[in-house]
Image: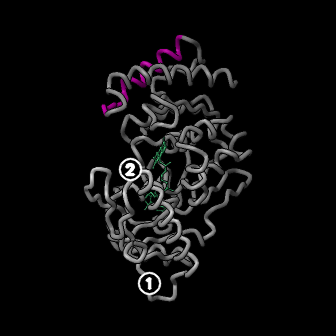
Amino acid sequence: MEKRILRKNSGNRFGKTAFYDIMTAKRAETTARAKRAGVAQSHGRTLENKDGRMGKVLSINQYVRAQSLDEAYTLCQKKNNVVIGGMLWLKMQKRPVGTAIDLCDLGLDSIAETETEYRIGAMVPLRALEMHEGLAALTDGAMEQTVKHIVGVQFRNCATLGGSLWGRFGFSDVLTLFLALDARVVLHHAGEMPLADFAQLPRTTRDILTEVIVPKAAGRVVYLSQRNISTDFPVLTAALAGRDGNYTCVIGARPMPAAVFTDDKGILGQGITEDSARAFAEDIASRAVFGSNTRASADYRREICKVLVRRAALALAKEG
Ligand SMILES: Cc1cc2nc3c(=O)[nH]c(=O)nc-3n(C[C@H](O)[C@H](O)[C@H](O)COP(=O)(O)OP(=O)(O)OC[C@H]3O[C@@H](n4cnc5c(N)ncnc54)[C@H](O)[C@@H]3O)c2cc1C
């Protein structure tokens, strides 16, 4: 099975260890999946489903551990090639990939602190964000609140910040918080830009996300989400940040990529009270666009939005 999923690259860039690592991981995963499904393991690019039908899986022709950002960037220009972060989202896709470009040798897995900002490498796992004391202090615990409901610890040890933001998922807790933190991203080719601008880039953009910058002047922030059941995708996410008397509210999992709203009417400007928090929440809920999916209807999301934003505003006032 492995040979057909991952064919050995004749080029000298191919790390032998990496090849065997990924083969072993793939073999273990496939065996476990086959056992769970109660079917014999298949030996091709397809796996047999419980009902005997053959379902397609992600297949990777070649795996490369890029040795420089230039190499990764050049490789990712080809439509059929993909950059891999933790590969947790990618592995759910059913398509053939030419070359999988692993960034794990490029030193993008650390969090650096300067006087004015945190610089977080794209390969930093969500679990590292959750456990980071400096980010916890900066966000009053909102960083942990944002990621702690995402599947489980082992999952968060693998899922990367880069993959989480690059995907601009319509359910993203991570995108919601980082937008509220006024984060900036660094793309290898396109350079540094506000995360809000990056979120608008066409999905066909082919670049490498290298770093995410969180300014220390991000202000106070509160993060809340609503889930039908713990660890499921969120029904709605909300982050509220207060900076120098200005407020930014981000609503995500609408279920569309998170959207940013400012307090244009100055509702919270005169101080956060029960009444102003409620009025602000009503205002945001009336401006945001919501959709329906299997988790909730648009109308339900609008109601939840009012609750989360009001609570977030009151929590922000409590934080002082
Ligand atoms: C079952 C499941 C449940 C989830 N639940 C939630 C949830 O509740 N809340 C939430 O916020 N998220 C959730 N996620 C998303 C998850 O947290 C990660 O965001 C997701 O798995 C992507 O991270 P990754 O590192 O695995 O990226 P990958 O799957 O490796 O990559 C994702 C995409 O980003 C691209 N990419 C990765 N890194 C880079 C880079 N540095 N530069 C350019 N492109 C890059 C890849 O090519 C790919 O297109 C869930 C995912 C799964 C599979």
For the residue labelled by badge 2, is the local secondary structure a helix, a strand or a loop? helix
Q: How is the image coloured?
A: one colour
Residue at image position (31%, 54%) is 49
Q: In whole angstroms, how far apart are the C-alphas of marks 2 and 1?
A: 36 Å
Tell me the quarter of the image containing the C terminus: top right
Q: Position of residue 80 (x, y in %)?
A: 33, 71
Q: Which quadrant would residue 258 be assigned to in this image? A: top left
Query: Type of residue at label 1?
Result: Asn
Main SS of residues in magenta: helix
Which residue has dot 2 on it?
A: 200
Query: Type of residue at label 2?
Result: Gln
For the residue labelled by badge 1, is the local secondary structure a helix, a strand or a loop? loop
- Asked whether residue 114 is drawn in magenta, I would say no
Q: Position of residue 113 (x, y in %)?
A: 72, 54
Write the start and end of the magenta stretch as one range.
275-293
Tell me the quarter of the image containing the N terminus: bottom left
Say whether disc 2 or disc 1 marks the residue closer to the N-terminus. 1
Q: Residue furthest top?
A: 275
Which residue has dot 1 on it?
A: 9
